[in-house]
């Protein structure tokens, strides 16, 4: 194949060792010179590897996105004295021939694809976006950990025969009288004090009190960490306040979800030529699997898990609104049946990501089409006319429309 880039390098990334293949013009016309070296992943060694690549006149470097091990290599390449174009490629796109698997051969194969211009780099967020991404992802982990801890606390109370967990503090402090515990109720719960008295009677002992104390201390610690992260995320998101406010105008998307969306896709949509490209990258579009004229499973491909999860949750929230997106969710839900809520949420998440692309590209707030959009479209006279024509043609009648007269 035709060589597009004369001096290229490719790196097979591992945890401790990386294999680097360099391909440059050979001594004779039409011949290519190939060198393969291995380096460990210490920072000083990576700097020596970058200096070697610069000395070879390399202009393009490609590597697979292997876990988190590509990150130190990528950062070292970005600090090179001469500018290097780094391509981080999806491992699924560069599979080698089975039976020829080694680190050196993988690096050579990647270099051959690179010099022919056959590789497409993945989206790597700018430094400001990467900071927010790291913070929001860790916040999600802490929220999940706090939820798990709350569930463990509820299990301890259940084991102690206590049916409500709002009296945990009083139980830990030594209070055991069901009447006193029930009297702690507030608001409308005070109408149910007799039932609460029964719910608070149990076999809560010292062991249960210790476990509840530990769980509550851990919950308080996680809550404090989440609050500190929220403060840091707010500060890091200040340059993107305008985009956050625009995304928050979309049904189902709040400020926190908008921060997650920006941290995953950024604010510059030039990276994604169309909304369809963004939906495909995120893994929110139907799969295309056809063979011998038969269409097989069209399930979505693997994409950005964090973005998919957030947009699916936003789709569920939007489904409860009287907006176009809410009507879309309910329309999908009716189509997929009673058990089709997950499919409807995924399909609505696709609608949301298309809206997000247009909002960020056009730098404008969301304009809702109305909850009655699909009803208006169906009730339109032209729509009824087209439906009647389709029904007549299905019965074998030939329908010819005469041109309208003035």
Image (spheres, rainbow, N blue to C red):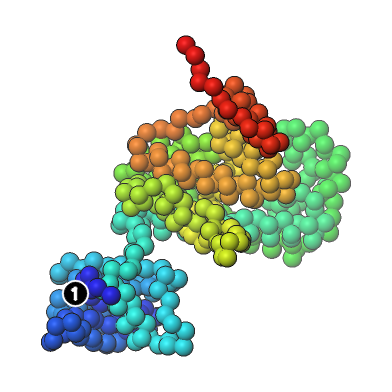
Task: Kindly indicate the quadrant of the structure image that contains residue 324.
Answer: top right
User: Which residue is located at x 34 percent, y 80 percent?
Assistant: 109
| Residue nearer the viewer, 329 or 336 | 336
User: Which residue is located at x 42 percent, y 80 percent?
Assistant: 96
Give coordinates of residue 58: x percent, y percent.
19, 75
Give coordinates of residue 282: x percent, y percent.
47, 55
| Residue nearer the viewer, 50 or 299 | 299
Q: Secondary structure at mark 1?
A: loop
User: Which residue is located at x 78 percent, y 34 percent?
Assistant: 190
Task: Kindly indicate the quadrant of the structure image that contains residue 36.
Answer: bottom left
Give coordinates of residue 114: x percent, y percent.
29, 72
| Residue nearer the viewer, 173 or 304 | 304
Residue beneath disc 1: 6
In the displayed structure image, the side of residue 329 where residue 110 appears, left or right: left
**Residue 25 in sight from this viewpoint:** yes
Q: Residues within 10 Å of mark 1 (few under 14, many from 20)?
A: some
**Residue 66 in sight from this viewpoint:** no
User: Which residue is located at x 23 percent, y 73 percent?
Assistant: 3
Q: Residue furthest top?
A: 406
Question: Relative to 351, does residue 218 appear above or below in the rendering?
Answer: below
Total tally of numbered discs in the picture: 1
Give coordinates of residue 268: x percent, y percent.
32, 47
Question: Relative to 339, does residue 243 appear above or below in the rendering?
Answer: above
Specify the quadrant that holds the N terminus.
bottom left
Question: Relative to 38, does residue 306 appear above or below in the rendering?
Answer: above
In the displayed structure image, the side of residue 319 where residue 37 appears, left or right: left
């Amino acid at each position: 194949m035709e060589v597009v880039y004369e001096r290229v390098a490719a790196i097979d990334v591992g945890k401790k060792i990386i294999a680097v293949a360099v391909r440059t013009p050979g001594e004779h016309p039409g011949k290519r010179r190939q060198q393969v070296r291995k380096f460990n992943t210490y920072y000083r060694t990576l700097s020596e590897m970058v200096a070697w690549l610069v000395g070879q006149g390399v202009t393009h470097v490609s590597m697979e996105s292997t876990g988190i091990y590509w990150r130190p290599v990528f950062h070292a390449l970005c600090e090179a004295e001469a500018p290097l174009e780094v391509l981080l490629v999806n491992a699924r796109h560069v599979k080698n021939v089975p039976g020829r698997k080694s680190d050196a051969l993988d690096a050579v194969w990647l270099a051959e694809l690179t010099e022919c211009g056959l590789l497409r780099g993945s989206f790597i967020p700018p430094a400001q976006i990467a900071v927010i991404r790291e913070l929001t992802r860790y916040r999600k982990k802490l929220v999940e950990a706090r939820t798990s801890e709350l569930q463990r606390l509820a299990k301890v109370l259940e084991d102690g025969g206590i049916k409500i967990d709002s009296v945990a503090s009083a139980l830990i402090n030594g209070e055991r009288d069901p009447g006193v515990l029930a009297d702690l109720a507030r608001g409308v719960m005070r109408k149910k004090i007799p039932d609460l008295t029964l719910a608070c009677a149990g076999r809560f002992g010292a062991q249960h009190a210790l476990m509840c104390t530990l769980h509550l201390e851990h919950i308080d610690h996680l809550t404090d960490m989440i609050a500190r992260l929220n403060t840091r995320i707010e500060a890091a998101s200040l340059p993107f306040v305008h985009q956050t406010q625009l995304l928050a105008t979309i049904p189902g998307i709040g400020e926190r979800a908008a921060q997650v969306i920006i941290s995953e896709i950024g604010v510059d949509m030039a990276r994604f030529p169309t909304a369809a490209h963004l939906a495909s990258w995120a893994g929110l579009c139907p799969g295309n699997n056809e063979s011998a004229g038969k269409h097989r499973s069209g399930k979505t491909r693997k994409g950005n898990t964090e973005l998919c999860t957030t947009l699916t949750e936003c789709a569920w929230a939007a489904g409860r609104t009287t907006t176009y997106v809410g009507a879309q969710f309910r329309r999908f839900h009716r189509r997929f049946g009673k058990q089709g809520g997950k499919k409807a949420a995924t399909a609505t998440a696709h609608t949301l990501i298309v809206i997000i692309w247009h909002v960020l590209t056009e730098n404008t707030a969301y304009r809702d089409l109305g909850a009655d959009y699909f009803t208006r479209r169906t009730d339109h006279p032209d729509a009824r006319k087209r439906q009647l024509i389709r029904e007549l043609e299905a019965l074998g009648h030939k329908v010819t429309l005469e041109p309208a007269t003035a």
